[in-house]
Amino acid sequence: MSVDITAADWSAVAPVAVLALTAFVVLIADLVSRTNVYRYLAIAISISGTIAAAALLAQQYGTHGSAFLGGFVVDDASVLFAGIIVLGTLGSIVLYGALGTPRRVAPSLALMLWSACGAMLMAGAANLMTVFLGLELLSLALYTLCAMADRAGAREAALKYLILSSTATGFLLYGMALLFGATGSVSLAALIAPALATNQLFWIGIGLFLIGIAFKLSLVPFHTWAPDVYEGAPLPVTAFMSVVTKAGVLAVLVRLFLWSLPAGHASTLLLPVWIVAGISMIAGNAGMLAQHDLKRMLAYSGIAQIGYVLAALAGAEAQGFNAALYYFTAYSLMNLGAFAIAAMLSSDREEGSQLANFAGLGFRRPWAAFAMTVFLLAMAGLPPTAGFLGKVLILRSTVATGYAWLGALLVIGTAISLYAYGRVVRAMYDREPHAVHDVRPFAPLAAISAALCTIAVIVLAFYPFTR
Protein backbone atom coordinates (compact mmCIF):
# COMPACT_ATOMS: atom_id res chain seq x y z
CA MET A 1 0.00 0.00 0.00
CA SER A 2 1.27 3.47 -0.88
CA VAL A 3 0.07 6.53 1.01
CA ASP A 4 0.85 10.12 0.08
CA ILE A 5 1.63 11.87 3.34
CA THR A 6 3.42 14.87 1.84
CA ALA A 7 0.49 17.18 2.57
CA ALA A 8 0.34 16.12 6.22
CA ASP A 9 3.97 16.34 7.24
CA TRP A 10 3.41 15.84 10.95
CA SER A 11 1.73 12.48 10.46
CA ALA A 12 5.06 11.10 9.24
CA VAL A 13 6.86 12.08 12.45
CA ALA A 14 3.96 11.38 14.82
CA PRO A 15 5.93 8.71 16.79
CA VAL A 16 8.83 11.15 17.18
CA ALA A 17 6.47 13.91 18.29
CA VAL A 18 4.87 11.63 20.88
CA LEU A 19 8.26 10.85 22.45
CA ALA A 20 9.22 14.53 22.48
CA LEU A 21 5.94 15.53 24.14
CA THR A 22 6.29 12.68 26.63
CA ALA A 23 9.63 14.13 27.72
CA PHE A 24 7.96 17.50 28.41
CA VAL A 25 5.18 15.83 30.39
CA VAL A 26 7.78 13.98 32.48
CA LEU A 27 9.50 17.25 33.38
CA ILE A 28 6.22 19.01 34.19
CA ALA A 29 5.10 16.09 36.38
CA ASP A 30 8.43 16.29 38.19
CA LEU A 31 7.93 20.00 38.87
CA VAL A 32 4.39 19.75 40.22
CA SER A 33 4.80 16.53 42.20
CA ARG A 34 5.43 16.92 45.92
CA THR A 35 5.24 13.29 46.99
CA ASN A 36 7.70 10.44 47.18
CA VAL A 37 6.09 8.69 44.20
CA TYR A 38 7.24 11.17 41.54
CA ARG A 39 10.05 8.84 40.54
CA TYR A 40 7.58 6.11 39.66
CA LEU A 41 5.22 8.62 38.06
CA ALA A 42 8.01 9.74 35.71
CA ILE A 43 8.79 6.13 34.83
CA ALA A 44 5.10 5.32 34.24
CA ILE A 45 4.64 8.36 31.98
CA SER A 46 7.80 7.51 30.02
CA ILE A 47 6.74 3.90 29.51
CA SER A 48 3.23 4.96 28.44
CA GLY A 49 4.56 7.47 25.92
CA THR A 50 7.04 4.98 24.50
CA ILE A 51 4.31 2.36 24.06
CA ALA A 52 2.12 4.98 22.35
CA ALA A 53 4.96 5.76 19.94
CA ALA A 54 5.33 2.04 19.24
CA ALA A 55 1.61 1.81 18.43
CA LEU A 56 1.90 4.66 15.94
CA LEU A 57 4.90 2.97 14.33
CA ALA A 58 2.91 -0.23 13.95
CA GLN A 59 0.24 1.73 12.06
CA GLN A 60 2.89 3.18 9.73
CA TYR A 61 4.30 -0.22 8.77
CA GLY A 62 3.48 -0.98 5.15
CA THR A 63 3.00 2.67 4.19
CA HIS A 64 5.39 4.58 1.96
CA GLY A 65 5.76 8.31 1.54
CA SER A 66 7.89 11.36 2.15
CA ALA A 67 7.47 14.47 4.24
CA PHE A 68 9.06 17.87 4.84
CA LEU A 69 10.02 18.36 1.20
CA GLY A 70 11.55 14.90 0.96
CA GLY A 71 13.75 15.29 4.02
CA PHE A 72 12.04 12.47 5.91
CA VAL A 73 10.66 9.23 4.52
CA VAL A 74 8.33 6.57 5.87
CA ASP A 75 8.97 3.07 4.56
CA ASP A 76 9.43 -0.42 5.95
CA ALA A 77 13.13 0.10 6.70
CA SER A 78 12.59 3.35 8.62
CA VAL A 79 9.71 1.87 10.62
CA LEU A 80 11.65 -1.28 11.53
CA PHE A 81 14.72 0.62 12.69
CA ALA A 82 12.52 3.06 14.60
CA GLY A 83 10.87 0.04 16.23
CA ILE A 84 14.26 -1.18 17.46
CA ILE A 85 14.97 2.32 18.79
CA VAL A 86 11.67 2.33 20.70
CA LEU A 87 12.45 -1.15 22.05
CA GLY A 88 15.87 -0.02 23.28
CA THR A 89 14.39 3.11 24.84
CA LEU A 90 11.70 1.13 26.63
CA GLY A 91 14.25 -1.35 27.99
CA SER A 92 16.47 1.46 29.25
CA ILE A 93 13.54 3.19 30.95
CA VAL A 94 12.77 -0.05 32.77
CA LEU A 95 16.36 -0.13 34.04
CA TYR A 96 15.89 3.35 35.45
CA GLY A 97 12.96 1.91 37.35
CA ALA A 98 15.34 -0.53 39.02
CA LEU A 99 18.33 1.79 39.49
CA GLY A 100 17.47 5.43 38.93
CA THR A 101 18.36 7.96 41.60
CA PRO A 102 15.07 9.61 42.70
CA ARG A 103 16.20 13.23 42.34
CA ARG A 104 17.61 12.66 38.86
CA VAL A 105 15.34 10.11 37.25
CA ALA A 106 12.91 12.60 35.66
CA PRO A 107 15.51 14.77 33.87
CA SER A 108 17.41 11.63 32.86
CA LEU A 109 14.29 10.10 31.32
CA ALA A 110 13.46 13.33 29.50
CA LEU A 111 16.95 13.50 28.00
CA MET A 112 16.76 9.84 27.03
CA LEU A 113 13.44 10.35 25.24
CA TRP A 114 14.77 13.37 23.35
CA SER A 115 17.88 11.41 22.40
CA ALA A 116 15.63 8.64 21.07
CA CYS A 117 13.82 11.27 18.98
CA GLY A 118 17.13 12.07 17.28
CA ALA A 119 17.76 8.41 16.52
CA MET A 120 14.27 8.05 15.03
CA LEU A 121 14.86 11.09 12.81
CA MET A 122 18.00 9.38 11.53
CA ALA A 123 16.01 6.21 10.83
CA GLY A 124 13.84 8.10 8.35
CA ALA A 125 16.40 10.65 7.14
CA ALA A 126 16.38 11.13 3.38
CA ASN A 127 18.80 14.03 3.15
CA LEU A 128 22.03 15.12 4.78
CA MET A 129 20.42 17.91 6.80
CA THR A 130 18.01 15.51 8.51
CA VAL A 131 20.86 13.10 9.23
CA PHE A 132 22.83 15.87 10.94
CA LEU A 133 19.81 17.17 12.86
CA GLY A 134 19.00 13.70 14.16
CA LEU A 135 22.62 12.96 15.03
CA GLU A 136 23.06 16.14 17.04
CA LEU A 137 19.78 15.67 18.90
CA LEU A 138 20.86 12.13 19.71
CA SER A 139 24.38 13.07 20.80
CA LEU A 140 23.83 16.26 22.79
CA ALA A 141 21.47 14.54 25.21
CA LEU A 142 23.86 11.60 25.55
CA TYR A 143 26.75 13.81 26.65
CA THR A 144 24.68 14.96 29.63
CA LEU A 145 23.28 11.51 30.37
CA CYS A 146 26.80 10.04 30.55
CA ALA A 147 27.77 12.60 33.20
CA MET A 148 24.68 12.06 35.37
CA ALA A 149 26.19 9.58 37.80
CA ASP A 150 27.64 10.04 41.28
CA ARG A 151 31.08 8.59 40.57
CA ALA A 152 33.97 10.64 39.20
CA GLY A 153 34.46 8.31 36.24
CA ALA A 154 31.16 9.46 34.78
CA ARG A 155 32.39 13.02 34.26
CA GLU A 156 35.60 11.80 32.70
CA ALA A 157 33.68 9.48 30.37
CA ALA A 158 31.29 12.26 29.36
CA LEU A 159 34.14 14.67 28.62
CA LYS A 160 35.98 12.06 26.56
CA TYR A 161 32.81 11.26 24.65
CA LEU A 162 32.13 14.97 24.04
CA ILE A 163 35.61 15.72 22.70
CA LEU A 164 35.96 12.66 20.48
CA SER A 165 32.39 12.74 19.27
CA SER A 166 32.70 16.41 18.35
CA THR A 167 35.80 15.60 16.32
CA ALA A 168 33.95 12.82 14.50
CA THR A 169 31.04 15.19 13.88
CA GLY A 170 33.49 17.58 12.24
CA PHE A 171 34.56 14.85 9.81
CA LEU A 172 30.92 14.03 9.13
CA LEU A 173 29.91 17.64 8.52
CA TYR A 174 32.89 18.35 6.28
CA GLY A 175 32.08 15.22 4.28
CA MET A 176 28.49 16.39 3.91
CA ALA A 177 29.70 19.76 2.64
CA LEU A 178 31.85 18.07 -0.01
CA LEU A 179 28.96 15.81 -1.02
CA PHE A 180 26.77 18.87 -1.43
CA GLY A 181 29.48 20.47 -3.54
CA ALA A 182 29.72 17.38 -5.74
CA THR A 183 25.98 16.88 -6.23
CA GLY A 184 24.46 20.32 -5.74
CA SER A 185 21.87 18.72 -3.45
CA VAL A 186 21.55 17.55 0.15
CA SER A 187 19.31 14.65 -0.85
CA LEU A 188 20.72 11.14 -0.38
CA ALA A 189 18.98 10.14 -3.61
CA ALA A 190 21.25 12.57 -5.50
CA LEU A 191 24.25 10.37 -4.66
CA ILE A 192 23.05 7.65 -7.01
CA ALA A 193 24.02 9.57 -10.16
CA PRO A 194 26.50 7.42 -12.19
CA ALA A 195 28.56 10.50 -13.13
CA LEU A 196 29.63 10.88 -9.49
CA ALA A 197 31.77 7.75 -9.73
CA THR A 198 34.48 9.85 -11.43
CA ASN A 199 34.07 12.91 -9.22
CA GLN A 200 37.04 13.23 -6.85
CA LEU A 201 35.11 15.59 -4.55
CA PHE A 202 32.44 12.93 -4.15
CA TRP A 203 34.96 10.24 -3.18
CA ILE A 204 36.60 12.46 -0.54
CA GLY A 205 33.19 13.47 0.81
CA ILE A 206 32.04 9.86 1.13
CA GLY A 207 35.31 8.97 2.87
CA LEU A 208 34.95 11.72 5.47
CA PHE A 209 31.27 10.93 5.94
CA LEU A 210 32.05 7.26 6.60
CA ILE A 211 34.80 8.16 9.10
CA GLY A 212 32.23 10.06 11.16
CA ILE A 213 29.78 7.17 10.93
CA ALA A 214 32.47 4.64 11.91
CA PHE A 215 33.14 6.58 15.10
CA LYS A 216 29.46 6.62 16.05
CA LEU A 217 29.38 2.83 15.57
CA SER A 218 32.66 2.45 17.53
CA LEU A 219 34.32 0.52 14.71
CA VAL A 220 38.08 -0.11 14.73
CA PRO A 221 40.17 2.09 14.76
CA PHE A 222 37.60 4.62 16.05
CA HIS A 223 36.53 2.44 18.98
CA THR A 224 38.81 3.50 21.84
CA TRP A 225 36.18 5.74 23.46
CA ALA A 226 33.53 3.03 23.80
CA PRO A 227 34.86 0.91 26.74
CA ASP A 228 35.62 3.95 28.90
CA VAL A 229 32.32 5.70 28.16
CA TYR A 230 30.30 2.50 28.65
CA GLU A 231 32.00 1.91 32.01
CA GLY A 232 31.63 5.47 33.26
CA ALA A 233 28.02 6.07 32.20
CA PRO A 234 25.08 4.97 34.37
CA LEU A 235 23.91 1.44 33.60
CA PRO A 236 20.61 2.45 31.87
CA VAL A 237 22.48 4.96 29.70
CA THR A 238 25.01 2.32 28.67
CA ALA A 239 22.17 -0.01 27.67
CA PHE A 240 20.56 2.85 25.73
CA MET A 241 23.77 3.71 23.88
CA SER A 242 24.45 0.09 22.98
CA VAL A 243 21.15 -0.22 21.11
CA VAL A 244 19.59 3.12 20.21
CA THR A 245 22.68 4.98 19.00
CA LYS A 246 23.72 2.08 16.80
CA ALA A 247 20.20 1.62 15.39
CA GLY A 248 19.98 5.25 14.26
CA VAL A 249 23.39 5.23 12.60
CA LEU A 250 22.83 1.82 10.99
CA ALA A 251 19.60 3.10 9.46
CA VAL A 252 21.59 5.87 7.73
CA LEU A 253 24.16 3.36 6.49
CA VAL A 254 21.50 1.02 5.13
CA ARG A 255 19.88 3.84 3.19
CA LEU A 256 23.30 4.86 1.90
CA PHE A 257 24.50 1.34 1.05
CA LEU A 258 21.37 -0.03 -0.59
CA TRP A 259 19.70 2.96 -2.23
CA SER A 260 22.04 5.96 -2.47
CA LEU A 261 25.30 5.07 -4.19
CA PRO A 262 26.25 5.14 -7.89
CA ALA A 263 25.11 1.92 -9.53
CA GLY A 264 27.96 -0.52 -10.17
CA HIS A 265 30.45 1.32 -7.94
CA ALA A 266 29.15 0.46 -4.47
CA SER A 267 31.62 -2.41 -4.03
CA THR A 268 34.60 -0.14 -4.69
CA LEU A 269 33.32 2.74 -2.58
CA LEU A 270 32.53 0.55 0.39
CA LEU A 271 35.54 -1.79 0.37
CA PRO A 272 37.17 0.16 3.26
CA VAL A 273 33.96 -0.33 5.28
CA TRP A 274 34.11 -4.10 4.82
CA ILE A 275 37.79 -4.15 5.80
CA VAL A 276 37.03 -2.15 8.96
CA ALA A 277 34.12 -4.50 9.71
CA GLY A 278 36.41 -7.53 9.42
CA ILE A 279 39.04 -6.02 11.70
CA SER A 280 36.35 -5.04 14.21
CA MET A 281 35.13 -8.65 14.43
CA ILE A 282 38.58 -9.82 15.54
CA ALA A 283 39.64 -6.82 17.64
CA GLY A 284 36.31 -6.56 19.44
CA ASN A 285 36.24 -10.20 20.46
CA ALA A 286 39.91 -10.17 21.44
CA GLY A 287 39.34 -7.06 23.57
CA MET A 288 36.77 -8.90 25.68
CA LEU A 289 39.33 -11.39 26.95
CA ALA A 290 40.99 -9.04 29.44
CA GLN A 291 37.87 -7.35 30.83
CA HIS A 292 36.57 -7.63 34.39
CA ASP A 293 33.54 -5.38 34.04
CA LEU A 294 30.39 -6.37 32.15
CA LYS A 295 29.92 -2.91 30.66
CA ARG A 296 33.47 -2.85 29.24
CA MET A 297 33.04 -6.42 28.05
CA LEU A 298 29.80 -5.57 26.24
CA ALA A 299 31.44 -2.48 24.74
CA TYR A 300 34.04 -4.69 23.05
CA SER A 301 31.35 -7.21 22.21
CA GLY A 302 29.35 -4.44 20.54
CA ILE A 303 32.34 -3.57 18.35
CA ALA A 304 32.44 -7.14 17.07
CA GLN A 305 28.65 -7.45 16.77
CA ILE A 306 28.38 -4.35 14.57
CA GLY A 307 31.14 -5.85 12.45
CA TYR A 308 28.88 -8.88 11.92
CA VAL A 309 25.96 -6.64 10.95
CA LEU A 310 28.06 -4.72 8.42
CA ALA A 311 29.31 -8.01 6.97
CA ALA A 312 25.70 -8.91 6.22
CA LEU A 313 25.34 -5.66 4.25
CA ALA A 314 28.36 -6.45 2.06
CA GLY A 315 27.23 -6.69 -1.54
CA ALA A 316 24.45 -4.15 -0.93
CA GLU A 317 21.62 -6.61 -1.60
CA ALA A 318 18.19 -7.10 -0.05
CA GLN A 319 19.12 -10.54 1.29
CA GLY A 320 21.93 -9.02 3.32
CA PHE A 321 19.65 -6.29 4.63
CA ASN A 322 17.19 -8.89 5.93
CA ALA A 323 19.99 -10.81 7.66
CA ALA A 324 21.46 -7.61 9.14
CA LEU A 325 18.11 -6.43 10.47
CA TYR A 326 17.34 -9.83 11.98
CA TYR A 327 20.72 -10.10 13.68
CA PHE A 328 20.69 -6.55 14.99
CA THR A 329 17.22 -7.11 16.47
CA ALA A 330 18.47 -10.24 18.21
CA TYR A 331 21.61 -8.42 19.40
CA SER A 332 19.47 -5.65 20.89
CA LEU A 333 17.47 -8.17 22.90
CA MET A 334 20.64 -9.94 24.11
CA ASN A 335 22.20 -6.67 25.22
CA LEU A 336 19.13 -5.34 27.00
CA GLY A 337 18.69 -8.66 28.77
CA ALA A 338 22.32 -8.75 29.94
CA PHE A 339 22.06 -5.21 31.34
CA ALA A 340 18.81 -6.15 33.09
CA ILE A 341 20.62 -9.00 34.89
CA ALA A 342 23.36 -6.57 35.92
CA ALA A 343 20.66 -4.26 37.29
CA MET A 344 19.33 -7.12 39.40
CA LEU A 345 22.78 -7.60 40.94
CA SER A 346 23.21 -3.93 41.80
CA SER A 347 23.11 -2.53 45.31
CA ASP A 348 22.11 0.94 46.40
CA ARG A 349 25.81 1.84 46.56
CA GLU A 350 27.27 0.20 43.48
CA GLU A 351 26.22 -1.16 40.09
CA GLY A 352 26.41 -4.92 39.62
CA SER A 353 28.45 -4.81 36.43
CA GLN A 354 31.66 -6.23 37.90
CA LEU A 355 32.09 -9.80 36.64
CA ALA A 356 32.95 -10.86 40.19
CA ASN A 357 29.28 -10.32 41.05
CA PHE A 358 28.32 -13.15 38.69
CA ALA A 359 30.43 -15.72 40.54
CA GLY A 360 28.21 -18.47 41.93
CA LEU A 361 25.08 -16.84 40.51
CA GLY A 362 23.80 -20.22 39.36
CA PHE A 363 23.40 -21.27 43.00
CA ARG A 364 22.23 -17.93 44.41
CA ARG A 365 19.73 -17.07 41.66
CA PRO A 366 19.40 -20.01 39.26
CA TRP A 367 16.89 -18.47 36.87
CA ALA A 368 18.94 -15.24 36.57
CA ALA A 369 22.03 -17.32 35.78
CA PHE A 370 20.03 -19.27 33.18
CA ALA A 371 18.87 -16.04 31.52
CA MET A 372 22.41 -14.64 31.48
CA THR A 373 23.67 -17.90 30.00
CA VAL A 374 21.12 -17.63 27.20
CA PHE A 375 22.24 -14.07 26.40
CA LEU A 376 25.92 -14.99 26.38
CA LEU A 377 25.36 -18.09 24.24
CA ALA A 378 23.32 -15.98 21.82
CA MET A 379 26.12 -13.41 21.55
CA ALA A 380 28.54 -16.26 20.87
CA GLY A 381 26.20 -17.58 18.18
CA LEU A 382 25.37 -20.97 19.67
CA PRO A 383 22.05 -22.83 19.20
CA PRO A 384 19.22 -22.78 20.10
CA THR A 385 19.32 -18.97 20.14
CA ALA A 386 18.59 -16.18 17.69
CA GLY A 387 22.31 -15.39 17.62
CA PHE A 388 23.00 -18.75 15.97
CA LEU A 389 20.39 -18.28 13.24
CA GLY A 390 21.54 -14.71 12.70
CA LYS A 391 25.13 -15.73 12.11
CA VAL A 392 24.04 -18.50 9.74
CA LEU A 393 22.09 -15.94 7.72
CA ILE A 394 25.06 -13.58 7.66
CA LEU A 395 27.38 -16.37 6.50
CA ARG A 396 24.94 -17.26 3.74
CA SER A 397 24.78 -13.64 2.64
CA THR A 398 28.56 -13.10 2.60
CA VAL A 399 29.18 -16.25 0.57
CA ALA A 400 26.36 -15.49 -1.89
CA THR A 401 27.66 -11.97 -2.56
CA GLY A 402 31.32 -12.92 -3.01
CA TYR A 403 32.55 -11.79 0.42
CA ALA A 404 33.42 -15.21 1.81
CA TRP A 405 36.52 -13.73 3.48
CA LEU A 406 34.20 -11.73 5.74
CA GLY A 407 32.40 -14.95 6.60
CA ALA A 408 35.72 -16.54 7.49
CA LEU A 409 36.59 -13.64 9.79
CA LEU A 410 33.17 -14.00 11.41
CA VAL A 411 33.93 -17.64 12.19
CA ILE A 412 37.34 -16.73 13.66
CA GLY A 413 35.85 -13.93 15.73
CA THR A 414 33.13 -16.25 17.01
CA ALA A 415 35.75 -18.80 18.08
CA ILE A 416 37.58 -16.11 20.09
CA SER A 417 34.34 -14.93 21.69
CA LEU A 418 33.50 -18.43 22.94
CA TYR A 419 36.30 -18.23 25.49
CA ALA A 420 35.35 -14.71 26.64
CA TYR A 421 31.67 -15.55 27.13
CA GLY A 422 32.46 -19.04 28.42
CA ARG A 423 34.51 -17.79 31.36
CA VAL A 424 31.51 -15.79 32.61
CA VAL A 425 29.22 -18.82 32.29
CA ARG A 426 31.77 -20.96 34.11
CA ALA A 427 32.03 -18.42 36.95
CA MET A 428 28.26 -18.38 37.37
CA TYR A 429 28.22 -22.12 38.02
CA ASP A 430 31.42 -22.24 40.08
CA ARG A 431 30.82 -23.58 43.61
CA GLU A 432 33.93 -21.96 45.09
CA PRO A 433 33.15 -19.16 47.56
CA HIS A 434 33.63 -15.61 46.35
CA ALA A 435 33.24 -12.24 48.00
CA VAL A 436 30.10 -10.70 46.55
CA HIS A 437 28.78 -7.36 47.79
CA ASP A 438 25.20 -7.01 48.93
CA VAL A 439 22.57 -7.29 46.21
CA ARG A 440 18.98 -6.19 45.98
CA PRO A 441 16.56 -8.80 47.31
CA PHE A 442 14.31 -8.33 44.30
CA ALA A 443 14.17 -5.91 41.36
CA PRO A 444 10.83 -6.69 39.67
CA LEU A 445 11.13 -4.37 36.66
CA ALA A 446 14.62 -5.65 35.80
CA ALA A 447 13.51 -9.25 36.37
CA ILE A 448 10.51 -8.91 34.06
CA SER A 449 12.68 -7.27 31.40
CA ALA A 450 15.28 -10.04 31.60
CA ALA A 451 12.60 -12.74 31.42
CA LEU A 452 10.97 -11.20 28.34
CA CYS A 453 14.33 -10.82 26.58
CA THR A 454 15.20 -14.44 27.36
CA ILE A 455 11.97 -15.70 25.84
CA ALA A 456 12.39 -13.45 22.78
CA VAL A 457 15.98 -14.55 22.11
CA ILE A 458 14.92 -18.22 22.14
CA VAL A 459 11.62 -17.82 20.27
CA LEU A 460 13.21 -15.63 17.61
CA ALA A 461 15.58 -18.49 16.79
CA PHE A 462 12.60 -20.37 15.33
CA TYR A 463 11.42 -17.45 13.22
CA PRO A 464 10.57 -18.75 9.72
CA PHE A 465 13.24 -16.74 7.93
CA THR A 466 12.83 -17.80 4.31
CA ARG A 467 13.92 -14.72 2.38
Image (cartoon, rainbow, N blue to C red):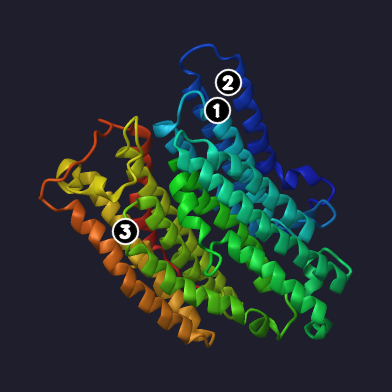
Checking the image for residue 66, the label placed there is none
- Label 3 close to label 1 by CB (< 8 Å): no
Disc with the residue nearer the chain's start (3 vs 1): 1
Indicate the position of residue 266 as horizontal and vertical percent values: 67, 81
Q: How many marks?
A: 3
Disc with the residue nearer the chain's start (2 vs 1): 2
Indicate the position of residue 434 as horizontal and vertical percent values: 16, 45
Q: Amino acid at mark 3?
A: Leu
- Label 2 close to label 1 by CB (< 8 Å): yes
Query: Who's the residue at 52% across and 63% down the image?
Result: 223
Q: Quadrant of residue 112?
A: top right
Indicate the position of residue 147 as horizontal and vertical percent values: 54, 39
As measured in the structure, the alpha-carbon distance from the residue carrying label 3 to the one carrying label 1 is 32 Å
Residue 3 in view: no
The front one of 56 and 420 is 420
The front one of 432 and 100 is 432
As measured in the structure, the alpha-carbon distance from the residue carrying label 2 to the one carrying label 1 is 6 Å
The residue sitting at the top extreme is 34
Indicate the position of residue 54 as horizontal and vertical percent values: 57, 43
Q: On the image, numbered disc 1 is attached to which residue?
A: 106
Q: Secondary structure at mark 1?
A: helix
Query: Who's the residue at 54% across and 11% down the image?
Result: 34
Q: On the image, numbered disc 2 is attached to which residue?
A: 30
Q: Secondary structure at mark 3?
A: helix
Quadrant location, the N terminus: bottom right
Q: On the image, numbered disc 3 is attached to which residue?
A: 376
- Seen in the picture, residue 224 relative to 121 is either above or below; the reply is below
Q: Within 10 Å of the Cα at label 2, are there few (<14), some (14-19), or many (20+) other Cα atoms?
A: many
- Seen in the picture, residue 412 relative to 156 is either above or below; the reply is below
- Seen in the picture, residue 61 relative to 350 is either above or below; the reply is below
Horizontally, is 181 left or right of 39 in the view? right
As measured in the structure, the alpha-carbon distance from the residue carrying label 3 to the one carrying label 2 is 38 Å
